[in-house]
Image (cartoon, coloured by chain):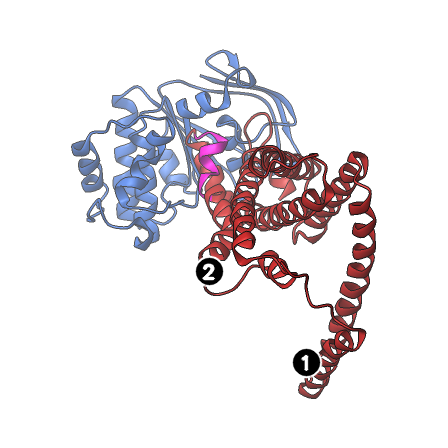
Amino acid sequence: MNGAVRLSILQVISAYLFIIILLLIVRKRGLNREKEIIISTTRMTLQLILTGYILTYIFKTPNPIITVLVISIMEVFAIQNIIKRSKNRLSKELKKVVIFSMLTGTLFTLIYFIFIVINIKPWYNPQYFIPLAGMVIGNSMTGISLGINKLVEGFKNQVDMIECSLMLGASPKDASKSILDNAFDSAILPTINSMVGMGIVFLPGMMTGQILSGSSPLVAIEYQIAIMLGILGSVSISVIIFLLLGYKTFFNNRMQIKREEL
Amino acid sequence: MFEIKNLKFKDILDIEHLIINKNSVTSIVGESGSGKTTLLKMLNNIISPDEGEIYYEGIEINNYNPIDLRRKVVMLPQTPVIYKGSILDNILIGKRFAKSFNYNLEEIKTLLEKFNVNKNLSESAENLSGGEKQRICLIRVLIMNPEVILLDEPTSALDENTEDIVINYIVEYTKKNNKTLVMVTHAKDIAKKYSDFIIEINKRR
């Protein structure tokens, strides 16, 4: 296959011109989001340039320690992001559950895909490992973020119903069942929706990138299919572990609901 | 049946010694904010006291598995809680929590009739009136066949006539089946008319 058409500096600058036009429109319409657009565009540019150089270096000198280090940084960033972005105050125990479920869900999926599905040799080959990890970790992060909000809000809004169930002799798990089902649905729905529209409504980012950089669409879809299955698995495993352990943090050892923490 | 010793909870309850007798009807009365509901919740172990002990059948409540205890000592909260589903689903939910799936349809129909709920069991329970919801919740507790029934203002949404019918039936049921009934009420006349014992809680000052 041919390599991608390289963009010249001028071409890249013309892409920024596009954003300047957008800014003018935003200002004229009084939408008050100029600052956010400028900051996000600048951040994205700097982060990607930096990543580009770092990845070039890492790809040239594959090293298991560096691969593991990169994954660790991704995990830490994703976990922090979940906790920081939660609309609700999270208990210490629930934060621990976030960490545990993120790590187990994503690492299990990554190991399965690296060793069995794609069978990369050596396993730490950063050219495969890092993009795969990024997609798996990023999607699990979004899933748990959505799940956490539904879980905490569910407990807040339905505390009387849960308590009524407990009074009737329900186990904490049965008492929280409707909240858990609802949280799982909303966590996994974006992944399901994107799978349904994939290839028809839009071309996924990874596939677009591969095609633009010269891969055959057939190779691109092979990877895309594998990745989507991995993402679905990773999101589901992380969210299921998160919910199965998470609901317990709302009850004490006498199976009473901790009202003071809601 | 219940014995309470030196119980303290926040600045709401301070009970030195209290016995609630088996096979009897006991009412808890007192002004609002005096801790009537809190006491009831403690008997169901949905709240624990800060200090003191509660014994059920001679065994300290914390030695029971809370789920097993709550299936014997069932509590009905003041605001009726209705779950998604039909009236029948709502009536059976207590039994379902206990993984008990047999029920006597005739018994349920009789109870509905006795309590003046003229609805079809397959109807959605969410559209019922407040009073109907309250009666559905009462039936839910009765068919669980518990040893002790704890009711928190069980008739707050009912008119006087229905209130009398419902309480009368529950008291009769309690006596006939050797159950124990403990109910919180603000209506002193109801308490006097139906109870064997009345516990009066005064607000702490």
Q: Residue at x 36, y 49 (%)?
A: B157
Dot 1 and dot 2 within a common chain: yes
Residue A42 falls in image quadrant: bottom right
- Residue B129 image point, x, y percent: 31, 54
Q: Which chain is red?
A: A
The span picked out in magenta is: A170-178
Q: CA distance from mark 1 to mark 2?
A: 30 Å
Q: Quadrant of residue A45?
A: bottom right
**Residue furthest toward the bottom?**
A28
Main SS type for the magenta part?
helix
Q: Chain of mark 1?
A: A
- Residue A79: give its label: none
The blue chain is B
In this view, the residue farthest toward the left is B106
Res. B205 visible in picture: no
Residue A175 belongs to magenta span:
yes
Is residue A111 on the magenta stretch? Answer: no
Q: Is residue B53 left or right of residue B92?
A: right
Q: Hey, what amino acid is under mark 1?
A: Leu
Q: Chain of mark 2?
A: A
- Residue wearing tag 2: A197
Mark 2 burial class by Cα count in 10 Å: few <14, some 14-19, many 20+: few
**Residue B36 percent across, percent down from the top left:** 52, 36
**Vertical placement of A240 versus A149: above or below?**
above
Marks 1 and 2 close (CB-CB < 8 Å): no
Which residue is denoted by mark 1 in the rendering? A31
Q: Residue at x 56, y 59 (%)?
A: A204
- From the top left corner, tell me how far across and down residue A215 is, in percent: 60, 57
